[in-house]
Image: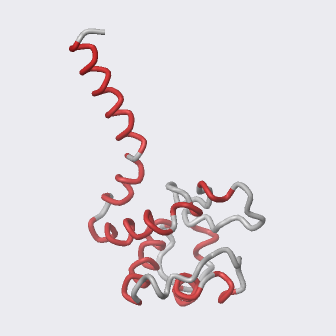
Amino acid sequence: MNARQLVSAFFVMGFASASCFSYADKAAAADDQYAKAAHVYDTYCVQCHGINRNGKGLNTRDMSVQPRDHSDAKGMADIPDDELHKAIKEGGLAVNKSVLMPAWGNVLTDEEIQEMVVYLRHVCQCGPK
């Protein structure tokens, strides 16, 4: 392999690697209003709720209770905002859901949790409740 082919190969590998994250980047950059919450979601939630926000994250294979699909407008529309806030802040058990959903109240501020609730409404396209 000559130098030109090697440079081309590295470029293609770099582009392919970057494209793996393009969906998450697009979701985070889709709207500046939601960028901060999308980043928090990508940091703390995506492992279980998935990069597509559909409840199919990397950690879900052996879970007996599957994480909520945040992209499901019908399912998300039935959940009041204060319940979403409580679930994020105090964990799944606080709202009679999975004990596997951790409490983020010691990690996220109330403002960040409220931004996450607004972001989740944006993801499901179901508006506040």
Residue at 67% x, 74% y: name it: 100
Question: Residue 89: percent from the left, percent from the top?
Answer: 52, 86
Identify which residue, 44 or 126, lies in the foreground: 44
Q: Is residue 2 left or right of residue 128?
A: left
Residue at 37% x, 66% y: name it: 39
Q: Is residue 87 above or below residue 75?
A: below
How many tags in the picture?
A: 0
Q: Can you say which quadrant of the picture contains the N terminus?
A: top left
Residue at 55% x, 62% y: name it: 71
Q: Is residue 10 left or right of residue 16?
A: left
Question: Residue 125: percent from the left, percent from the top?
Answer: 48, 67
Quarter location, residue 66:
bottom right
Question: Residue 68: percent from the left, percent from the top?
Answer: 63, 68
Q: Is residue 107 above or below residue 9?
A: below
Residue, far right: 64
Q: Is residue 11 above or below residue 64?
A: above
Question: Residue 119: percent from the left, percent from the top?
Answer: 42, 72
Q: Is residue 99 left or right of residue 111?
A: right
Identify which residue, 61 or 27, lies in the foreground: 61
